Amino acid sequence: MEALEVEESTARSVRKRSSYVQGKRSLARASIASVAVLSGSSRAEVHDDGDADDDLAGGLSAPETVANFVICAVGAGVVVFPKVMKDNGIVAAILLLFLSAFVCFECGRVILECCTMAEAQKGLAKGSLQTYEAVAEAAFGRAGTAALSVTKNGYFLGTILAYTVFLAAAVEKWTAFIPMGSDAMRSSIVRWLIVTPLFLSLATITDLKKLSALAPVGTAAVFTQAVTICIGSLLQAFQPVPTRTYTAPELSFGTVGTTISIFVFGFDAIVSLPAMRGQMREADELPSVLNKGMAIVALISGTIMGIGFAGFGNEVNDNVIDSLGTFMTTGELSLSSTMGSLASLGIMVNLLISVPIIFYNFTSFIESTKSSEGDALRTPMTTQNIAFRFAVMISLVLVGSAIPFAKQLIGLVSAVFGSFNSVLSPLAFFYKLRREAPEVQPLHPLRAVLHVVVVLVGSTALVFGTIGGVDEVLEKLKELSGAARPDALLQSVLA
């Protein structure tokens, strides 16, 4: 009897261990796949060819693809969501978040249908069309690909611009104990002597296999960032602060447009659905993956937004981590400052892994336009090519030093480029492909009405989000003595 009990106990332990290992392996596979998705590359390009135990062999399962989608969607941008709730009020912010999620969900469905129609049109196997650019080409030919390339690369550069501001702020927190003179001088030293060399080194990465090895670390950083923001904000929410208020402001079209564009930034993983579709074991399961992935991302975004605002009310900063503080900036080792420190560390790691992937997209596009063998500028890692990479990165850091407002930059970049990429383009591709398809089912009238709503929401983000974003940037610049603050380190060198 005892032998049977021992045997059963051992079997349970083995099953538990097997389940744990399988879960860990699935998360690692999803993390590695996210590198391929974010870079718009195939599995082979991010995989070590010498690894006989192919991490992505056989394709991703539906749960792994859900994890992949969430990893791609939840990034540094969520730290501005609590301030978005402050700018709109609790009810309006929640409504706009779920309106944006619903619009992006429908656009995700449209993108998947575009893939199916394009494959049928070209006589391709299901799942063989694996890039958003391929969808654009199927719909509008080279003109569609060219237009999408411009907006996508503008979006990539704008995202890196906002990330330079995020990273500089995070590094400033972790170096607060080091004497560097005035706050302006500290910002300049961090930006030019720490952030810029880091970004220049990241700009030279051309091998995605190196990044795939760090993918699980990036996943852990995203998880750490989200959880510590929530814990730290909850700790603040339960502390009695008589001056904490939660008043709702008056809304304007500019504020609504900017808010929608910021939320669209949080759901921009939908443009990676063709790549995810190509990675899946069963492409037919992707609609279900989209349902679950969007629900999880919306829940995470809403939770961070709500708890972050609950913790600080109308006093919440543009970046909620600034409100949390760190034990380096406060000089106190408390649970709240520890959460802020971990959140700051999480966002740093997240950015250091995300930036080279995004920049790889941009440089790959530039290098793909190479016209001749003698074109050194567009030949990877030639002297001219490296100089070009450095010039782009330094320019982004320089603009970030003049406009150090991450929230406003995200809103503006997403309004100008994200609304086109994630909302308006999918519908344009969809109706063009439907018109050319030999056999297509009639569109339900209610869905046609829904698409009118999607166009209105996308247009609101594009027009009023751009106007509101520019107004917010100008207002922030006025707070810096009516003009962009001169870079203290650069000013001292020139003097």
Image: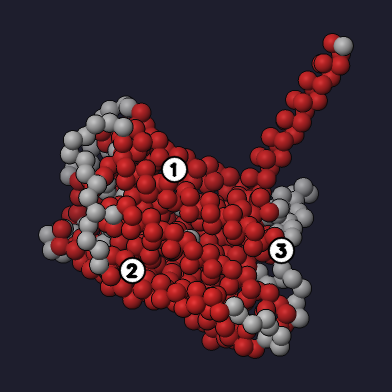
Query: Pointer 3: what residue?
Result: 283
Kindly identify which numbered label has been placed on residue 225. Answer: 1
- Image x and y of residue 3, in percent: 87, 13
The answer to whether residue 433 of the structure is visible from this angle is yes
Q: Nearer the viewer, mark 3 or mark 1?
A: 3
> What's the colour scheme?
secondary structure
For the N terminus, which image quadrant? top right
Q: Amino acid at mark 3?
A: Ala
Q: Which residue: 21% across, 40% down?
A: 244
Q: Is residue 219 left or right of residue 228?
A: right
Q: Nearer the viewer, residue 252 or 76?
A: 252
Residue 43, quarter of picture: bottom right
For the C terminus, which image quadrant? bottom left
The 10 Å Cα crowd at callout 3, few under 14, some 14 to 19, many 20 or more, is many
Query: Pointer 2: what residue?
Result: 257
Query: Quick one: label 3 or label 1, which is nearer the N terminus?
Result: 1
Answer yes or no: do the residues labelled 1 and 2 have beta carbons within 8 Å? no
